[in-house]
Amino acid sequence: IPHDFCPSLRFRVRIYPIIRSSALVILILHLGIRSELTNPSWWSELLIFNAIPLLSVIAIWHAPKSNDRWARTGLALAILSWLISSIASSWNSFFGFQFPDLLIDGGYLIFYPFIIFGLTRQMRNSRTSKSLEFLDTIIVAFGATTAIGILLIKPATATFSSNSLDIFLSIFYPLGDLMLFTLVCSIAISQKISLRNLLLVSGTLIFATSDLYFLWATSQGTYSFGSLTDDGWLLSIILIAESTWHKGDESNKESKLNAIAVTFALFASLLVLVIAILKPNFFTFGSLAPAFITITLAFARMLVALTDAKAISSERALARTDELTGLANRRKFLAELEIFRNGEGSLLILDLDGFKEINDTFGHEVGDQLLRQVATRFSRALPSSALLARLGGDEFGALIRGSEGFESALALRATLSYPFTIATNQVKLDVSIGQALNDPDKPSNELLHRADLAMYEAKRSGAGAVC
């Protein structure tokens, strides 16, 4: 380690590889203990088992800052909610004081929105992630998982004799696992192969497989607490945590996955509401809440998209507008010139005479006010089809369509025939104007050059305007 490393950085370099590797070592130790014990013990299932996701949360939280902060937050919260439910479930298996089942189920349910959000952000280039991606993943989580589960609750009630919550959970968990794995694989396919994505896909596959096996064994009555297969959850958590320490696909290519997934989730939610309208007693109000949330988020996404589009439009306008005068700037003038020069018209270059002396005498603030007033007078003297731009300093340019270029030049010069009043001071300006007629056979830079020559001739000769 270089000597100029700060102590906290030296600590990070040394301690976090130990934390990351210790989770895998504890998993191997736990497998060995389970293979030796006839019955699970509280210290192996409550302490050792749950130490692994705890270490994984620490590893994720302190992963390199180059990875997306929101991705790390989502993954850490997902594993933390799973850990809380796991601790409560393990406690209930050994001790008399019992945590409520609602706490355990709630932690496992919250795990899915967090993990979907975290994985989706983690598998994309963090530099291109935006607020729309956040809304997309939440919409997908609520719509494509919960809303579809609601659609199956009513048919399931004809088969299961359990209460509504148990039926909902029996449908939600397998759908959540399937959606989780499908979403991750879809994103991975659209990107280049990387170690981070391989870890995420492997971890998600192992988690979904372990979870589906647990659900199947529970439904068959063959599952026993403390089975070796439970360690599949731990291995998946370790792989997901390790992925946050590696770089993925850093390309900036856009994926259409979000739009497709959001459309599907919104369609499913709308379908639920349509059925509820046609058959008012088909769903309970509580079961419709996720559908309402999905549609509300879809409207929020639309507002964010419109706001982003407006911001982009404003940025483009600012990029082509002179901040001082509000006229077009040099960039827009040159872009319009490429189109303008193919037809009949004139290019005018205008240079103010006497502006430097006024600016030096009264200061830049007066000079700026004077430029704004000049821009106002020039704008009023030109036809609506003309383009007036400030090219820089006290130089302006104008594109005049048709054959009235020289008449427009004289009109522009006439606007300066009476003085300006600025801060009780009256100042007088003149302008030298050079005109160049369009020639479609010549490039635009030659047209500019000819207009410049004409402007300098007007200034040298005192003619005011020269074609």
Image (tube, rainbow, N blue to C red):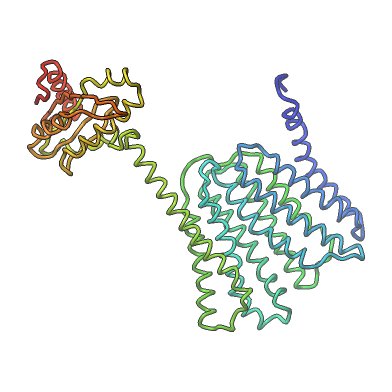
* Residue 118 in the figure: left or right of residue 328: right
Horizontal arrangement in the rendering, residue 173 relative to residue 137 (left or right):
right
Q: Position of residue 32 (x, y in %)?
A: 86, 50
Q: Which quarter of the figure has residue 344?
A: top left
Tell me: residue 444, above or below residue 33.
above
Q: Position of residue 433 (x, y in %)?
A: 15, 26
- Nearer the observer, 67 or 226: 67
Tell me the quadrant of the picture where the N terminus can be found.
top right
Residue 155 visible, this angle: yes
Image x and y of residue 425, in percent: 28, 26
Residue appearing at x 61%, y 70% in the figure: 149
- The quadrant of the picture occupied by the C terminus is top left
Q: Residue furthest top?
A: 460
Residue 382 versus residue 313: which sits nearer the camera? 382
Visible residue check, residue 443: no
Please determine whether, in this image, residue 53 is positioned above or below residue 361.
below
Q: Going 8% across and 34% down the picture, which residue do you hit?
A: 407
Q: Looking at this view, is 16 or 219 the one in front?
A: 16
Direction from residue 209 to residue 95 in the image, left or right = right
In percent of width and height, residue 182 lies at 58, 58
Residue 113 position by quadrant:
bottom right
Task: Using residue 37 as the reference point, say whether residue 373 is left or right of it.
Answer: left
Q: How many marks?
A: 0
Q: Look at 20% across and 24% down and name the residue there.
A: 429
Residue at 52 percent of width and 66 percent of height: 295
Which residue of the protein is positioned furthest toward the front in this rendering?
A: 424
Give the answer, above or below, for where 18 lies relative to 363: below
